[in-house]
Image: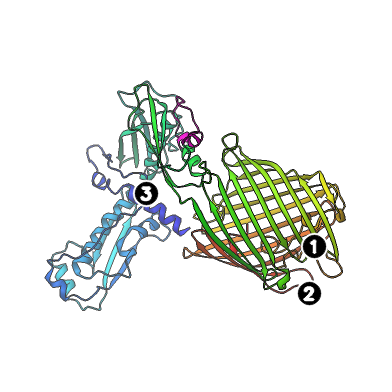
Amino acid sequence: MGRQRRRAGALLVAALLALAPELGSAQETEGADEAGDAWDTPEAQDVPQTEDAEPAEDAAAADEPPGIPVELDFVLDEDSPVRDALNDSLVLVRRADDPPATPLGLLRRVTGDVDLALQALRSLGYYAGRVTATIDGQPPDAPGLVEDLRARPADEPVHVVLAVEPGPLFVIGTIDIVMDPDAPPPLSELPGDVLELAPGDPARASDILLAEARIVDALRAAGHPYADVPDRRAVVDHDQHTMDVSFTVAPGPTATFGSVTIDGADSVDPDFLAGRVPFERGAPYRPDDVNSLRQSLGDLDVFSSVRIQEATQLNPDGSLDITATVEERPPRFIGFGAGFATSEGIDAIVYWGHRNLFGQAERLRIEAAVGRLLENDFDEIEYSLGATFAKPDFLTPGQSLHLDLSLLEEHPDAYSRTGAEASAIVVRTYNEEISYNFGLTFEVSEIESDDQTERLSLIGVPLGVTFNSTDSLLDPTEGLRLDFELTPYPVAFGDSEPFVRSEFSASGYYDVAGDGSLVLAARGRVGSILGADLDAIPDTRRFYAGGGGSVRGFPFQGVGPQDADGDPLGGRSLVEASLELRWRFLDDFGLVPFVDAGGVFENTVPDFREDLDVGAGLGFRYYTPIGPLRVDIATPLTGDDNDDPVQLYISIGQAF
């Protein structure tokens, strides 16, 4: 929360940096003064600061000690609403560990902080505030003060008192929106509540600047690309403790979209890129459509940057030309990854890929992986070789084709498998948060379990829908993610029967602190298989639980029914739940206490009369540009005494 308050305080203080001279004195004849029009922009984020570099001509400075110790007495109520903003702006507070080198430097800091404190008060709506300062009991302009400071012992602290009296909080009196004389008649497109500011609200500079920005945004959304507020006037009434605000609005002409030019895309088919423009020439101008263009190009993964520029003037027909300047990424890429889990050993992967295989942002990735190193015997190490191909805008914009082929050998505790899988999936984007998919899968496998070998072939018809409002793939801090998958297997050859597998998962993230430093994350997952007995369902398609992405504290596939030898049997239904509290500190480090629970059942629906297995632990995070490095240590709270007391998991990305 401290970081959030500091940012908010910085914005409020910066908002009136240029306003202070106009607000310094009230006009006694009217009891009001004009705030002027020199406010900073809403984007200003830095607290105004003063520097105290010593003048080169101060000959005495050469003999001064490295720093003058300062004892600051900041006189202000502890619970004052302005205290945080002042602490973040005052040089005497921010640089307490860096004392001034000379008496002139100290004097400069004190007088500068008086001005900064007044600016901060006004930015927060306290226009009648007072700030006074003394240095060893004398005002900063006292004659002979500098000489007195030079004459004092070098190790004796200088006592500085900074007293702040905020005074009454001023509120908004009236708000007027005045149409520029050259503008068309008043616009019905500008709703009355667009300002999100009303009489009686605190007269904070940042809120007024944001209200001005909302006027411009509302006019642009109504089709006026050159909307502006050329004049803003704010008059403070010291008798009534109010501020009257007026905005002069110049909406400018309405526009339609003209031509779209994409510069910098040398290796991408221009006709393909033109098909990704989300609006037609002649359509009414909307800034959301411009943002959609930026997103549409950025989603291709072939560009490292996309910059959109609107023409500075309209064409004679009232259309607005758009230029998108892109920078291409290297077409080829290579990479590797590794992970570790106590029950699974080490796994590693290497891959090579191409981002623009045929000139229309087709993506090919070939990867080889090895798993269960140090866990299984050498002849039972897992291998896989796979290739994935993705074709964006397959048949129609917003629809992609995904082809996958993999050869693999697996040896988890539940079974051993040698086989091949292939799939063709079409993903259709409904909007920014919702997508759905459908396709075909084919699997041929030889599976060994319970000293029996089964040969089977499966054809599946996967159907799915996804809702995702999270803010990050590898490290979300807010939002919701929902996934539902339904896969009928109508054709089964060998030792299997047709069945239907369904699964629903949900995860949610709540930013407790508001700045991403403390996030409450929760996850749930349920699944069911219908249409066949457990023995007729291939081991590879049953539900299992346990491990780093499931119920931590238990081995991989270690939750659920087992045979006489203690090997997992899998089940026809599953339920899982997880809860984490993710605390990030010192920018790059994090701690995550967590608890997981889950169960696997032989029936087609979870039987909650059976006890769920529960694990808990503590995770450590190191945040990198590609996602957090995750180290989780967990212990089972239920289960058999034969379970290992501690499980360790290492990977990239959060657990969910």
Say which quadrant the C terminus sits in. Answer: bottom right
316 in magenta? no
> Which portion, as a residue range, is magenta?
270-290
The residue at which mark 1 appears reads as 560
Asked if the residue at tag 1 contacts the one at tag 3, i.e. Cβ–Cβ closer than 8 Å, the answer is no
* Residue 498 percent across, percent down from the top left: 84, 46
Say which of 55 and 193 sits in front: 55
Q: CA–CA distance between discs 2 and 1? A: 15 Å
Q: Which residue is mark 3?
A: 124
- The numbered mark at residue 641 is 2
Q: Earlier in the sequence, mark 2 or mark 1?
A: 1
Q: Nearer the viewer, mark 2 or mark 1?
A: 1
Q: Position of residue 411 (x, y in %)?
A: 74, 65
Q: In the rendered image, which quarter is residue 522 located in?
A: bottom right
Expressed as whole percent of the image width and height from the top left, the position of residue 503 reads: 74, 49
Q: Quadrant of residue 134?
A: bottom left
| Colour scheme shown | rainbow
The structure residue drawn at horizontal position 40% and vertical position 58%, both measured from the top left corner, is: 84
For marks 3 and 1, the one nearer the N-term is 3
Between the residue at mark 3 and the residue at mark 1, the CA separation in whole angstroms equals 59 Å
Amino acid beneath label 3:
Leu
- Mark 2 belongs to which amino acid? Asp
Question: What residue type is disc 1 on?
Answer: Gly
Tell which tag, 3 or 2, sits nearer the viewer: 2
Residue 609 visible (yes or no): no
- Between label 3 and label 1, give the one nearer the viewer: 1
Query: In screen coordinates, is 562 left or right of 515?
Result: right
